[in-house]
Amino acid sequence: MGGSRGRTGAFRREPGSSPSLVFIHGAAESAGVYDRLLDAIPGFARYAINLPGRAGSDGPPLEAVASLADWLAEFVNTEIEGRYVLVGHSLGGAIALEHAISGSSERLAGLVLLSTGARLRVHPFILELHEQAAHSGGELPPLAPGLYEEGADPTLLAEANRYRALTPATTGASDWRAADTFDRILDLASVEVPALIVTGSDDTLTPPKYAEYMASHIVGSELHLLDGGRHMLIMERPSELAPLITRFVERL
């Protein structure tokens, strides 16, 4: 546990060498989605954080990526010593990009952008479902189809649902609103650190063209498409992501 902007933030920490890796989850998720990936990357210090309003991190949730990036800046200033790399998935990738573009810290060494984009328009149906759940005081809607690969391991899906249960519906709705209003598509030239960009070839939520656009506009970036991968490759493809991330960070 640690403090950020006077709030308590919950996170998983694994000790290791510098630079530290800070993992930021996506909308309506929590840090547990990174458990398998953290376990597959030995050596470096690793932090998987819960964004405000879920799983032990104080609320209320924040409704803009810029506000979430401010919260992140306070977290790294409070908890992280030395250089660090931000690893962001989906909405977490937007937060990582915002942090880099705003020039929040000279200690930022690099970005790992997973299944994300410089602009994240959300389908109105997803927004409506989460708004309805928030207003009714119910639970988060079921997992959207297409997030996981065909024939996904039922044990993995049950694990994913347990992590989602740690996010209140009001927080999930705030996350999706933040994603929907995020747009840094004209500002990628401001990213001054190396970036590793990875997405699944079959990701329909943040399709490969998003990753390709970022790669063509961030100087010194590296792009990988995982064949057949879908949006939740951080849970389904940790054995492929881990060596990509490790090699990238070792070169920094």
Image (tube, rainbow, N blue to C red):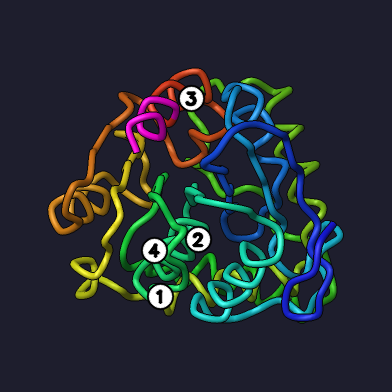
Cα–Cα gap, marks 2 and 4: 10 Å
Which tag, 4 or 1, sits closer to the chain's start?
4
Cα–Cα gap, marks 3 and 4: 21 Å
Density class for disc 3 (Cα within 10 Å; few <14, some 14-19, many ≥20) is: some
Query: From the image, which quarter does the C terminus lie in?
Result: top left
Q: Secondary structure at mark 2?
A: helix
Amino acid residing under circle 2 = Leu
Cα–Cα gap, marks 2 and 3: 20 Å
Which tag, 3 or 1, sits closer to the chain's start?
1
Q: Which residue is mark 1?
A: 182
Indicate which disc residue 97 carries: 4
Which tag, 2 or 3, sits closer to the chain's start?
2
Q: Residue placed at 27% from the left, 33% from the top? A: 224
Residue 179 at x, y percent in the picture = 48, 70
Q: Secondary structure at mark 1?
A: loop
Q: Which residues are magenta?
A: 246-252
- Residue 216 vs 9, above or below: the answer is above
Q: Answer left or right for 23 relative to 78.
A: left
Amino acid residing under circle 1 = Phe
Q: Considering depth in this image, is 47 or 175 the residue closer to the camera?
A: 47
Amino acid residing under circle 4 = Leu
Indicate which disc residue 117 carries: none
Q: Residue placed at 76% from the left, 44% from the top? A: 12
Q: Which residue is mark 2?
A: 91
Q: Secondary structure at mark 3?
A: helix
Residue 213 at x, y percent in the picture = 18, 55
Q: Secondary structure at mark 4?
A: helix
Q: Are marks 2 and 1 in contact (CB under 8 Å)?
A: yes
